[in-house]
Image (cartoon, grey):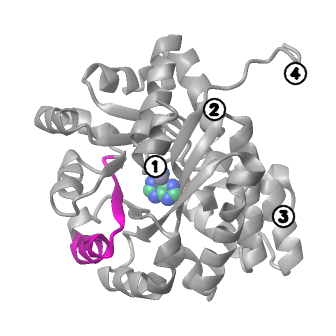
C-alpha cells in the first residue's frame, strides 16, 4: 500500500527493550569513528553477518563487545533518540527501557554519563516522538552480588530518573536469589522490580524471582509452561510476562516462530505482552514482532488488540495514563 493508505500501527507499549540492543550497525560505525574506537569488522554488512547466534551467551559476547563505541553522554543520547524514532514508526506510545550500567562502568564510563545521556533523550521523548518513557536499571547476573550492590549505591543520586530495577545477562547458573539483598534495597527506595527469568533458565528461577525478589513482572518467562503450578500462580496473580518472540527464535530458545508458545500462554490466561528485546540484533522492533507472530501463528485482529491492551495493563504507567489506552 502507498504511504497514504498504510494503516497506522496498533498503539502499544514496549516493556522489554535493552537500549544497548538497539545499536544498529550504522550507528555503531558512526560512533566508532567519532570516538576513535576500532571495531573488529570492516563494514556494516560484515558486522550484520555476525548476527547469527547459537544461544544467549553467543549473542551477549557480541552485544558487550559492540558497546565499546558508547563513551560519551552524547553517544547515549543519540542511541536513545535513534530508538525512539524507530519505535514511533512501529506504534510504540510508551517505552520502559532497560540499560546495563555495569557494562559501561566496567569499561571506565561513569554511571552519570550513561544515565544523564539517556535521560536527556527521554526528557524530550513525549514532545518529540509522542512516547512516554521509563528507565529500568538492570544488574548483570553473571557479575557478583557485591557489584550489583555497588552499582545500586552509585545510582542513588539518580534514582529520581529510574522507575525500576531489573536482572539480565547470562541466566543459567545465576539464580535470582543471588540478588535478594539489592532488590530489597531497591524496593525500600520505592522502585519497582522486574527480572529476566525462564528464558534459558528453569521454572525454578521464575519462582525465585517472584518469591525471593518480589518482582512485579517476569521478563521472558516462556519456560514457565513447563510447570503447571507456576502457570496457575502467574495466571491467578496476573503477573505480566514480557515475551520476545523474534529474540526467542534468534537465540534458539524456540526452534521456529510457528512453534512459539505465545498462543498457549494466552490460552492459559497469562498476562502476556509482545516485545523486541534487542531489536538491532534480532531482526525487528516492537511492531515487527507483532507482525511476525500474526503471520507465523495466525493470530487474529482481536488477539493482537488483546496483546496491545496487555502491554499498557502491564506497564508502570499510573492508572489515569493507562486508562487512556484501555
Ligand atoms: N541482555 C540483553 N538481552 C538479553 C536477553 N535476551 N536475556 C538476557 N540478558 C540480555
Ligand atoms: Zn532481555
| Residue 282, above or below 160 | above
Q: Nearer the viewer, mark 2 or mark 1?
A: 1
Cβ–Cβ below 8 Å for labels 1 and 3?
Answer: no
Which label sits on residue 224?
none
Determine if the C-beta at disc 2 is less than 8 A from ligand 2.
no
Q: Where is mark 3, residue-wise? A: 29
Task: Specify whether residue 249 is painted magenta.
Answer: no
Q: Earlier in the sequence, mark 2 or mark 1?
A: 2
Are there few (<14), some (14-19), or many (20+) residues within 10 Å of tag 2? many
Task: Write down the region rendered in magenta.
Answer: 178-198
Q: CA distance from mark 1 to mark 4?
A: 31 Å
In this rendering, position of residue 116 left or right of residue 3: left
Whether the magenta-drawn stretch holds residue 179 is answered as yes
**Sequence-first tag of 4 and 3:** 4
Q: CA distance from mark 1 to mark 3?
A: 35 Å
* Circle 2 residue: 287
Amino acid at each position: 500500500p502507498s504511504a497514504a493508505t498504510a494503516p497506522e500501527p496498533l498503539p502499544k507499549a514496549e516493556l522489554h527493550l535493552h537500549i544497548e540492543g538497539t545499536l544498529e550497525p550504522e550507528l555503531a560505525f558512526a560512533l566508532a569513528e567519532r570516538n576513535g574506537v576500532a571495531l573488529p569488522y570492516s563494514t556494516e554488512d560484515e558486522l550484520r553477518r555476525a548476527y547469527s547466534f547459537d544461544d544467549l551467551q553467543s549473542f551477549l559476547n557480541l552485544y558487550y563487545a559492540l558497546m565499546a563505541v558508547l563513551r560519551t553522554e552524547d553517544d547515549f543520547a543519540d542511541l536513545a533518540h535513534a530508538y525512539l524514532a524507530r519505535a514511533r514508526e512501529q506504534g510504540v506510545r510508551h517505552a520502559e527501557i532497560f540499560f546495563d550500567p555495569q557494562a559501561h562502568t566496567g569499561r571506565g564510563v561513569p554511571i552519570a554519563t550513561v544515565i544523564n545521556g539517556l535521560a536527556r533523550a527521554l526528557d524530550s521523548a513525549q514532545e518529540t516522538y509522542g512516547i512516554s518513557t521509563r528507565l529500568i536499571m538492570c544488574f548483570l547476573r553473571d557479575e557478583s552480588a557485591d557489584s550489583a550492590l555497588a552499582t545500586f549505591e552509585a545510582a542513588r543520586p539518580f534514582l529520581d530518573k529510574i522507575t525500576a530495577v531489573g536482572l539480565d545477562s547470562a541466566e543459567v547458573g545465576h539464580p535470582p536469589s543471588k540478588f535478594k539483598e539489592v532488590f530489597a534495597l531497591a524496593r525500600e527506595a520505592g522502585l519497582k522490580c522486574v527480572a529476566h527469568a525462564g528464558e534459558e533458565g528453569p521454572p525454578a528461577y521464575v519462582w525465585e524471582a517472584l518469591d525471593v525478589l518480589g518482582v512485579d513482572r517476569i521478563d521472558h518467562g516462556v519456560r514457565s509452561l513447563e510447570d503447571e503450578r507456576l502457570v496457575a500462580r502467574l495466571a491467578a496473580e496476573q503477573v505480566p510476562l514480557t515475551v520476545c518472540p523474534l529474540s526467542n527464535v534468534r537465540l534458539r530458545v524456540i526452534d521456529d516462530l510457528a512453534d512459539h508458545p505465545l498462543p498457549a500462554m494466552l490460552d492459559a490466561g497469562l498476562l502476556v505482552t509482545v516485545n523486541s528485546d534487542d531489536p538491532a540484533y534480532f531482526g525487528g522492533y516492537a511492531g515487527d514482532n507483532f507482525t511476525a507472530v500474526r503471520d507465523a501463528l495466525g493470530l487474529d485482529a482481536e488477539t493482537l488488540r488483546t496483546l496491545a491492551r496487555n502491554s499498557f495493563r502491564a506497564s508502570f504507567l499510573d492508572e489515569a495514563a493507562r486508562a487512556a489506552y484501555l
